[in-house]
Amino acid sequence: MNSPILTHSATHTGREVPEDTVDSLLSKMTLEEKIGQLQQVDASADPFPDDLIDGVRTGRIGSVINLAQTDACNRIQRVAVEESRLGIPLLMGRDVIHGFRTIFPIPLGQAAAWNPDLVREAARIAAVEARSQGVHWTFAPMIDISRDPRWGRIAESFGEDPYLTGLLGSAMVEGFQTDDLSGHGAILACAKHFVGYGASESGRDYSATNIPANELRNIYLEPFRRVVEAGAATLMTSFSDIDGVPATANGALLNGVLRSDWAFDGLVVSDWNAINELIVHGLCEDGRSAAAEAALAGVDMEMAGDAYARHLAGLIEDGVLSISLIDSMVARVLRLKQQLGLFERPYTDAAGFDPLVSDRALKVAYESAVESLVLLKNAGAVLPLREAQLGSIAVIGPLADAPHEQMGTWVFDGQKSDSVTPLQALRQQCSGKIQVNYAPGLETSRSRTHDLFGAAETAVLKSDVALVFLGEESILSGEAHSRADIRLPGAQSELLARIKALGKPVVTVVLAGRPLVISENLPNTDALLYAWHPGTMGGPAITAVLFGKEAPRGKLPVTFPKSVGQIPIYYNHKNTGRPPNASEMILIDDIEVGALQTSLGMSAFYLDDGFEPLFPFGFGLSYGHCELEDLELSQPEIGQGEQLKIRVSARNTGGRTGFETVQLYIRDITGSLTRPVKELKAFKRLSLEPGRCEVVEFELGAADLSFYRRDGSFGPEPGRFCLWVSTSSEGLQAEFSLGA
Ligand code: NOJ
């Protein structure tokens, strides 16, 4: 066994730090060892294959992925630290996307809470749980702007808005990393996928993207700019082809925008085998040129591919790549290992951590799930259920008691035995007071047979209200799980229609990884609560909201289309030269027909589906009813250095405590480039007792009005602006100007 070359000394703070700097370590490394640091390999096979152990021992592997168990992590780490020539510890990566063992709502659900503090807290818990099992690096947050609900990975995103995505992505980074990477339970975040993956054509995963330069800058890159500012230590490239240059070889974006414009000095990792896929894209002829393209573009580490391992040495020998380029790539890896304190503490002692799925973790999972729930319909105030007036409830639907499905996509370490399902929670809530009649009606969300409908109808007929849990199984969203038809799968719509026909009040809860097209279902339910995939504590959270122990308060982070044909549909679209106008539409046999087929009265809408979505971005009801009034601006015009103050009164005119998220949008009416019809700039969350009124204040300055302009520079443009303050992306309007 070789002993590690690193020696340690104590500083005045008492903490051990390596005597060797990254530079002196670099000076001791062979080229093969350097290239090894740029290699991440899959370590999921159990037992470890010989070539993995040998690769670690000989310094040809710098990082592993898919290992998340303390003993196994320590075992392979021991080979790196005690048996390799330089004793450089491994970096252990794992996809910890919305929780490690305790599962929080899918990111799209967390986004519906519009609560960065809660996202930060959930990420903190996930990080500590993951770190306790030996994980150093997660591949989250995913901050791909997602405008297409067919795309399975919309579940992993924070939705369609760059401001909200940037804010929540930054909070997640802070939760994972804290402000000291060597501190207790800190892990590296990885913002992904740089950039544009969410624009995959037709919502089909991995398909090409076509993003105009100004949309790329102002929409898709914007959240990345913010998380880089928030200190994200690593970024992952996107699989996608972006304007002919796949993201993994896109030097203009990686070296240009990321490193040069934004001064990002962290690590860039490829996505899984994405360097070799440059050959499949048709950009590179072979692995050698793929390795050269990626390295020159700014990709430091290769995930689960062999292009770097096979070709970097030859490329250096032939002078295609310089050794100083390789050194700077390796230095980024070593620096992170040093910042994490791995040279001093390479092993994990799970005993130093709270147990997994602690009470605290469950409490935050419950709060995240409560806040993620979006009430989309509540006709006749059927919700909250009045416990005292209920003798029995029917619990129907394939997702009422599906502990695995409620966790959603990207769950590697969560266990369904930890999940509390809606049925379990409802039984507990009703115990000794209300009869629970459970009949799933369908075995899974995809079942087509009506065989179990009869039993479901019988259960409803015996009950005072039907609670129907519909949606998608977890496998129907996530990576490589795009869908072309995003209505409720299987015979769920028929089941709901049959239940509605029985004449009892119907409350539908949808558990899904995306906005589903639910237009045909809305008439068949009195209330509809959108629960996404709510995670471990989904059942108690949903039950608490149904029974009014908690008020719903989620707001949609993404537009809900009426039909698949409307996609992509998003609130911050451009106005066009012929914006849609409801007054121009004439209904003939239920089909909306433009007034005249001349250049008058022709505008941007569908004959059959108009132009409005089913539910707009930012929409969500609560049990109270909040009205906004008295919108006031401090002045009609602000100078470049001034702040506009905006005040509005929020009044709860309902009979119950209400939660509201007051949203501020602007529109830059005329620009050197056309600007979106609305852009979210700020929001404030309130809780109001019935009859209470609260003044909400916002400030806007030139920085908030900035964008990448026609000449490529970033900044605001003088002129007129519209401003809206509202409880969804539709509301009270005013105007102001920015002076020159
Ligand atoms: C491929 C996915 O695109 C990426 O997001 C993920 O982190 C890696 N696989 C590792 O599992």
Image (spheres, helix red, strand yellow):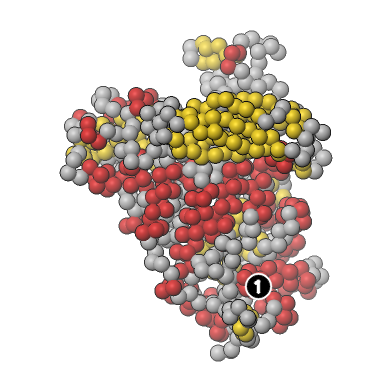
Residue 19: image location, x then y, percent: 66, 83
- Please tell me how crowded label 1 is: few (under 14), some (14-19), or many (20+) other residues with Cα within 10 Å: many
Dot 1 lies on which element? helix
**Could you say which quadrant of the image residue 436 lies in?**
top left
The correct choice, above or below, for 53 with respect to 652 in the image is below
Q: At x 71% / y 62%, what residue is drawn? A: 265
Q: Nearer the viewer, residue 497 or 333?
A: 333
Q: Position of residue 114 (x, y in %)?
A: 52, 43
Q: Residue 151: in sight, yes or no?
A: no
- Decide if residue 654 is on the left or right side of residue 25: left
305 and 608: which is toward the camera: 608
Q: Residue at x 62, y 76 (%)?
A: 60
Residue denoted by label 1: 334
- Using residue 464 as the reference point, say whether residue 521 is left or right of it: right
Give residue 91's quadrant in the image.
bottom right
User: The C terminus is located in which quarter?
Assistant: top right
Residue 281's x, y, as percent? 66, 52
| 346 in relation to 648, above or below | below
Q: Is residue 162 visible?
A: yes
Direction from residue 583 to residue 474 in the image, left or right:
left
264 or 690: nearer the viewer:
690
Quadrant, the N terminus: bottom right
Q: Along the horizontal axis of the image, is 131 left or right of 448?
A: right
Q: Residue 566: give x, y in percent of width and height.
A: 55, 29
Q: Identify the amino acid type marked 1.
A: Leu
